[in-house]
Amino acid sequence: MDLKVDSTSDGQVLTLVGRGEIDYATLDVLENELDKATDSEAETVVVDMKDVTYIDSAGLGVLVKAHRRMTSENRALVLRVTSPDIIKLFDITGLAHLFAVEMPYDADGPEGTASES
């Protein structure tokens, strides 16, 4: 499966919306978009993963790299996750404590923050 990433910005917040699978075969798409986002002047980069169906360890590594760069510049990288499997992956790997991870309480309710760094 392919990965498509769209970006929008209001100046302070740049949002990347991913659709598809993040794995070794699609990693360059995510990495290129995150490089552009971290090169921008946005204080916060949001990676919206609501339509991401899978992420492997290589994808996690790219997110960690972007997180390190953003935090070294006193900026924030926020992940928006709705997939129970991806939420579980972040919990199991301990990355839920590294990233600010937003997830909805339920489909109709407000969004909350699972953890913040």
Image (cartoon, helix red, strand yellow):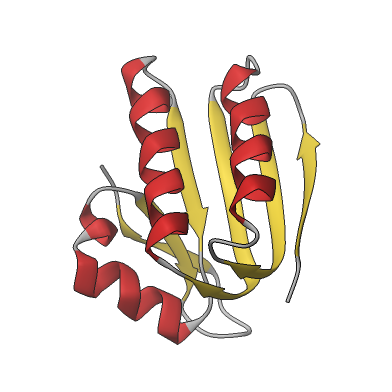
Question: At 43% from the left edge and 32% from the top edge, which residue is drawn?
Answer: 76
Question: At 25% from the left edge and 42% from the top edge, which residue is drawn?
Answer: 117
The quadrant holding residue 41 is: top right
Q: Is residue 84 above or below residue 70?
A: below
Q: For the image shown, how many numbered marks are present on the structure?
A: 0
| Percent of width and height locating residue 13 | 64, 32
Question: At 33% from the left edge and 49% from the top edge, which residue is drawn?
Answer: 99
Q: Answer left or right for 98 relative to 102.
A: left
Q: Answer left or right for 77 relative to 107.
A: left
Q: Answer left or right for 81 relative to 89.
A: right
| Percent of width and height locating residue 100 | 36, 49
The quadrant holding residue 69 is: top left
Q: Is residue 73 above or below residue 55?
A: above
Q: Answer left or right for 107 relative to 75.
A: right
| Percent of width and height locating residue 91 | 25, 71
Q: Is residue 51 above or below residue 35?
A: below
| Percent of width and height locating residue 10 | 76, 29
| Quadrant (top left, top right, bottom left, bottom right) of the N terminus | bottom right
In depth, the one of 55 and 14 nearer the eye is 55
Q: Is residue 26 above or below residue 65?
A: below
Question: At 36% from the left edge and 43% from the top edge, which residue is drawn?
Answer: 64
In depth, the one of 39 and 24 nearer the eye is 24
Q: Residue furthest front?
A: 25
